[in-house]
Each structure stands twice: as C-alpha cells, then as structure tokens.
Amino acid sequence: MATRIVYSLLYILSLLPLGALYALSDIFFLINFYGAGYRREIIRSNLQHAFPEKDREALRRTEKQFYRHFANLMAETVKLVSMSAGSLLERVKLVENEDFKHLANTPKTAIVLTAHYGNWEWGGMALDLHMQKKTMAAYKVQRSAIADNLMHRLRSRFGIEPVPMKLILRRLLREQDTAPIGIFIADQTSTQGEAGLWMEFMHREVPFFAGPESMARRFDLPVYMLFIHRRKRGRYEIRVELISDNSNEMREGDIMKMYIRKLENALRQQPPFWLWSHRRWKHADRRVIF
C-alpha cells in the first residue's frame, strides 16, 4: 500500500515537463550545495584521492558540477516514472558500432559491465530497448521495502528484469539457451563476506565483485562495457565496447583490470558525472592485489 501511494505521487510529479523538473532540481542543487551539503566530506575525500594532481580550485569546481549533475539525476529519475520508450530513445542515442552489433548477434549469454556514470538508469534501459534479447540487471536489495519495490518497478518498465545480485548468475546460466544479457553496475564495492578482486582504482586499492568475471571465464562468455556519456543536460550517448571475446583464456583479474582502466579514462574525461557520493573506497585498507 505504501509503495503504491509513493509511486502514485511520483507519477503525478513525473507528468511535469522535464524542463519544470529541472527547475525544481536547480532549487534542490542550491539548497544542497550551499546548505545541506549531502555527503560533502565523502565527496571531497573521493575527489582529492582520485585527482591528486588537481588544485583546490579545480576540485571545488568539479564538486560543484557533481552536485548539479546529482540534482539533474533526481529530476531524470522522477521523469522516468512516466516517460515513454520513444522519449527515452530520443534523449539517449546509441552509437551503433561493431561492438554493439557483436553484442546483439552473439549466440552466447553476454555480460555487460557499466558504472554509476552519466545516467545509468536511462542508459541501461535504452540499451535494452535496442536489443531483441532478454535483459537482466543485477541489483542490491534495498533495506527499505518501499525503496526496493519502487526501484524494481521503475527499472522493469521497458522489459528489463531486475534480479538480486546473489541470484543473477544462477538465472543467466539457467536461461543460457536464449542467450540473455546480464547488466552489472560493476563499480560497486563488494562487502565483507563476499568474494572480491582487490585492484587499484583511481590511485587506491579496493575490492570489486568477482562474480561476473568468474562466470565469464568459467563458461567462456563475452564481456562488454556500456558507456553512458553526458552530451548536455537531459541528453546522453551510449556506446558498447567489447572487453573480452575469449574469456576462458584470460587470467584472473584481467577482465576487471580492463574494465577499470576504461572507467578511469571516462572519469578523467568527464569527472563530474560519476557518483562521487558513493563510499567506494570504504574497504581500501584490506587488500590483496591482482
């Protein structure tokens, strides 16, 4: 009942033109950046460690740009509640390169790694709308049942099936005869008790989920990376890049290393558009590096 009420309120709000939602997000940005300062200490620490070569002025400029982007994401997420598939595809353009065609035509189950970069919700849904295959998206179950139900309902609007992280590898294997696609937001930190690959990311060592790489190497599945680049406010471009087409020949950690290097390059090109409020390096002191 509570989920239905919250979703209904969000739906009514989402009927506003995106421009009006952006006007509200501008107000939210001003309150957040100049007042509340949501996770400001975490954001500043992350930026300082990620870009040690930048001076204070440059870091503060990136911090401000991130807060503005974060506010825009709030507006874009609300709009997604009622946005049509056509409107989404108008705002998120696909680069139809050879790697995308490879993904679309592979007869195998495919692993797609992406990140909290650009607008990952819009990007993942736009990719699915271009595919003729079943797409599953791994997600972490939220502590709040209302938040979990809301995100599940939102992410499944256009056909993606959200699957809990602990179950998705099993589901992909069970349905491999249909060559499904599994999308993983792979820049999330693994938690205590979960197997992780410890690697250097933006000058610090942190654990990455081992599951997607382990599955790809064991069953020789192709691995791709989905980039979601921001072109301007409310406009994105998605591009698929092949990471590995011979995964069973890769050594442990090689696939994730390639993913990390590609992500680092993207962050250096457009620093404000990653989720810097994410506590990505909270386990950085316990490390066994590959």
Image (spheres, helix red, strand yellow):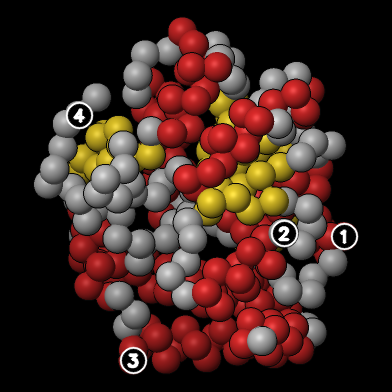
Q: Residue at x 79, y 36 (%)?
A: 133
Name which of mark 3 and mark 2 comes first in the sequence: 3
Q: Which residue is mark 2?
A: 156
Q: Residue at x 76, y 40 (%)?
A: 134
How far apart in space, not on screen, are marks 2 and 1 (Cα)?
Answer: 16 Å
Mark 2 crowdedness (10 Å alpha carbons): few <14, some 14-19, many ≥20: some
What is the number of the mark on residue 232? none
Pointers 2 and 1 in contact (CB under 8 A)?
Answer: no
What is the number of the mark on residue 35? 3
How far apart in space, not on screen, are marks 1 and 4 (Cα)?
Answer: 45 Å
Tell me the quarter of the image containing the C terminus. Answer: top left
Q: Secondary structure at mark 2?
A: loop
The kind of residue on which mark 1 rests is: Gly
Q: Which residue is mark 4?
A: 289
Name which of mark 2 and mark 1 comes first in the sequence: 1
Q: Residue furthest right?
A: 86
In the shown orientation, is residue 74 left or right of residue 277? right
Pointers 1 and 3 in contact (CB under 8 A)?
Answer: no
How far apart in space, not on screen, are marks 1 and 3 (Cα)?
Answer: 37 Å
Q: Residue 17: percent from the left, percent from the top?
A: 78, 83
Q: Which residue is mark 1?
A: 86
Name which of mark 1 and mark 3 comes first in the sequence: 3
The kind of residue on which mark 2 rests is: Ser
Q: Secondary structure at mark 3?
A: helix
Q: Nearer the viewer, residue 211 or 246?
A: 211
Q: Secondary structure at mark 1?
A: helix
